[in-house]
Image (spheres, rainbow, N blue to C red):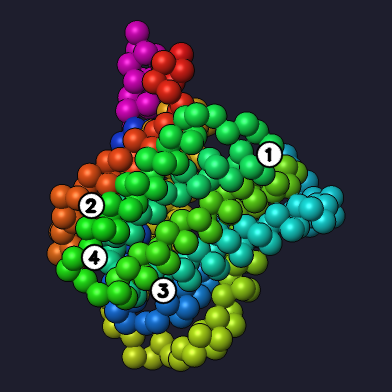
Amino acid sequence: MEQAIARRGTVGGIYIRLVLVQLFWAGTFVASEVALHDQPPAVTALVRFFLTTAIYGAMCIVVRDATASPLLMRLRDVTVRNWLALTAMGFFGVSLYTLLLHIGLAASTAAYAALLIPTTQPIFTALLSRLAFGEAVGSAIIVGLALGLVGAGLVLLGGLSSSEDALLIGNVVIIASAFSFSCYAVSAKFAPASLSSIENTTLSFVFGTLFLLPMPLLLGETLSLTDTTPSFWVSIAYLVVFATVLPYLWWNDAVKSIGSSRTGIFTFLMPPLAVALAALVLGHMPVPIQIIGGVLSLCGVALATFGWPRRAAR
């Protein structure tokens, strides 16, 4: 009986951490918008991932499996296809995704990103996975994609009556960033199995940061951090620690303990938490039609992820 109580306590702690993970990820959009008030999109992205990559590099050393051979030896066995996958992960998941998100947020708001990205990205990922791996696209995927697109359309429609064209363009760019992250998710399935997930992530972050290096110059931004405000560095610290490092460790621990399916269900908490944070911190209140669109998109995500209710129950 004591073991059962201890087990329930352990699982309860995992559930609490998973809720915190969704809360931390929900705050990503708010923290990004705050940082963008101080620095342009490419500079903000470069600073964030330069620091994140350094921390992940340290994690590779600290969290290394003592029974595994040295990393440099295992890198010799990485194939060209694996290197291309890691490069694609860095390009789509770090460089392009973050740039598009920041450019979109510069014209839009964290509330829109909170409604659009968590609801469209899983559907894009499910569809791309079917296409990339030659799997049949079932009716649940098709209906889920349709619901997701209708929901995203309602979110966009809700802001048209009270905003200018720049907001619409920003929201379209945000949806494009969700599609870019879906490309990252598909590319990650080709990452080398001989490396740990932390090592694969670190290498992809290295490539992504390299892609980001020339972006401030290409976009005509000035790379100057001498006049930044404390709010910028607080936002960057949040994005590095609470949006990346801690969630990564807690999420992987949960997958090992309770399985990927039960862990994945917690992602449905992110949109409402993100919308609530955007309203509390930034004052961005969604209109009813946008909330309806978010709910429809979440239903589409559920269908695309778990299938029809009877099949999901089995």
Mark nearer the N terminus (3 vs 4): 3
Q: Nearer the viewer, mark 4 or mark 1?
A: 4
Mark nearer the N terminus (3 vs 2): 3
Q: CA distance from mark 1 to mark 2?
A: 34 Å
- The reply to whether discs 1 and 2 touch (Cβ–Cβ < 8 Å) is no
Q: CA distance from mark 3 to mark 4?
A: 19 Å
Q: Amino acid at mark 4?
A: Leu
Mark nearer the N terminus (1 vs 2): 1
Q: Amino acid at mark 2?
A: Gln
Task: Name the residue nearer the viewer: 156 or 45.
Answer: 156
Label 1 crowding class (10 Å Cα cut-off): few <14, some 14-19, many 20+? few
| Residue positioned most to the top | 1
Q: Residue at x 37, y 82 (%)?
A: 39
Image coords of residue 249 (percent x, y): 48, 46
Give the residue number, with chain letter if any, for mark 3.
Answer: 103
Is residue 243 left or right of 282 when viewed as pictured? right
> Do we see residue 246 in this rendering?
yes
Task: Name the residue nearer the viewer: 64 or 89.
Answer: 89
Q: Is residue 4 magenta?
A: yes
Q: Residue at x 76, y 52 (%)?
A: 82
Q: Could you tell me which secondary element the residue under label 1 belongs to? A: loop
Q: CA distance from mark 3 to mark 1?
A: 31 Å
Magenta span: helix, strand or loop, mainly?
helix
Q: Residue at x 37, y 26 (%)?
A: 11
Q: Could you tell me which secondary element the residue under label 4 belongs to? A: loop
Numbered circle sitting on residue 133: 1
Rendered view: 137 above or below 44 = above
Magenta residues, start to end: 1-13
Give the residue number, with chain letter if any, for mark 2.
Answer: 290
Image coords of residue 280 (percent x, y): 15, 59
Rendered view: 129 above or below 173 = above
